[in-house]
Image (cartoon, rainbow, N blue to C red):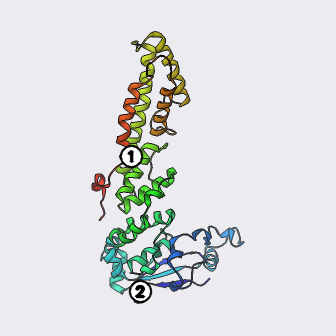
Amino acid sequence: MPDRYYEFDPEGDVTFVFEDVPKSLPYRLGEINASFLSGIYDRKQSYPTSMSSEVAINRTPTTNLVQAVKSALSPSLHIRTSSKHLMLASPHFKRTFQKGFQEGNELQSTGYVKITTHDWKPLPFLLLMAILHGQSQLVPRKLPLRRLTEMAILVDYYECYEAVAMFADLWTEGIEERQQKLSMGNAIKWLCIAWVFRQNRAFKDITRHLQLESKERVTPNGLPIPTNLIDTLQKSREMSIGKVIDSLHELLERLRHGPQQCGFGCDIMRLGALAKGMDELEILSPKPEAPFSGYSFMSLMAGCYEIDKSYTYDSCRLMSDVLEMVGNEFPLLDAGFSLESFSSLRTKA
């Protein structure tokens, strides 16, 4: 299978090599357009995942045979670029091509360097190279979440925030509407995107969602999100959920063991209603502990109001103190976080 050779600069001195790229990849850079790089058609492309799925070979082939068959099945991609463009846009590349680094030493001694790349998918990397070399006609104005996440990872790794900023603003336009229906996995992706591309409104919305709605431990899932930010989100989530559960259990203990809260009959009715409601919320016994998997602040808040609403004995409120605490806690979480609050975590430009 013939290899692919793309030139962003015909006189470029840095070539990136991707091995085993999809056979559907066009032969020339001129055949690629913005829609192709957007990621909309990724699933239609062929990414061989194992030799056995493509060709029948001996169970114990020699290494050379495996490599030969592999090369025949899948082409490699060679991307010729300009070190000047790369270093101008990316502090990472500026460091890499300095004397003292292997790539920099080779570039300065021979005037050319070839870098085999294993960490990235070829299409997101091509899109980044198009931006860094001013090929704006290849840059899509909209990206699906998957490709947007891939670009955020690349931009953060190569530290080329300013070079991509204009396109990032286009890609994240309407980001608030796109966040309306969030799974936990998608929420973390949006957090990464908002953090890397410095979208404050989206950052507030997604940190609000994670504090209020998350039913699982907040984890970065390998995405470039500062550990301190993740820890702050998780701590806030755990503390707010813990406050609700503790308040309900404290009220339960007061009703069980005194002192008497209201009349004897009223307290008995309140105790029964509270125990039943807590059992339905699955927080009666055993008492849940951090990290409170399966619980969110919003689900517990809704449960508290439902329990209180269902209590109709006499004119007493079942849990006025608990509802007051919940009411005070909610706006603090609902405000979300601002990017400015975490500016000290940005170790990269």
Above or below: residue 145 compared with residue 229: below
Residue at disc 1, secondary structure:
helix
Front residue (pair 35, 123): 35
User: Is residue 10 rendered to the left or right of residue 45?
Assistant: left
Estimate the spatial distance between the alpha carbons at disc 2 and disc 1, rounded to whole Å: 44 Å
Q: Position of residue 136 (x, y in %)?
A: 42, 79
Q: What is the crowding at mark 2: few (fewer than 14 residues within 10 Å), some, or many (at least 20)?
A: some
Which residue lies at the image location 41% right of the left edge and 68% below the top edge? 170
Front residue (pair 72, 65): 72
Above or below: residue 30 compared with residue 98: below
Residue at disc 2, secondary structure:
loop
Q: Mark 2 — residue? A: 9
User: Is residue 343 rendered to the left or right of residue 35?
Assistant: left
One can see residue 241 in this view: yes
Q: Amino acid at mark 2?
A: Asp
User: Is residue 79 rendered to the left or right of residue 341?
Assistant: right
Q: Position of residue 59 (x, y in %)?
A: 70, 67
Q: Are the residues tagged 2 and 1 within 8 Å (C-beta)?
A: no
Q: Position of residue 206 (x, y in %)?
A: 42, 52
Q: Nearer the viewer, mark 2 or mark 1?
A: 1
Specify the quadrant that holds the N terminus: bottom right
Q: Amino acid at mark 1?
A: Leu
Q: Mark 1 — residue? A: 233
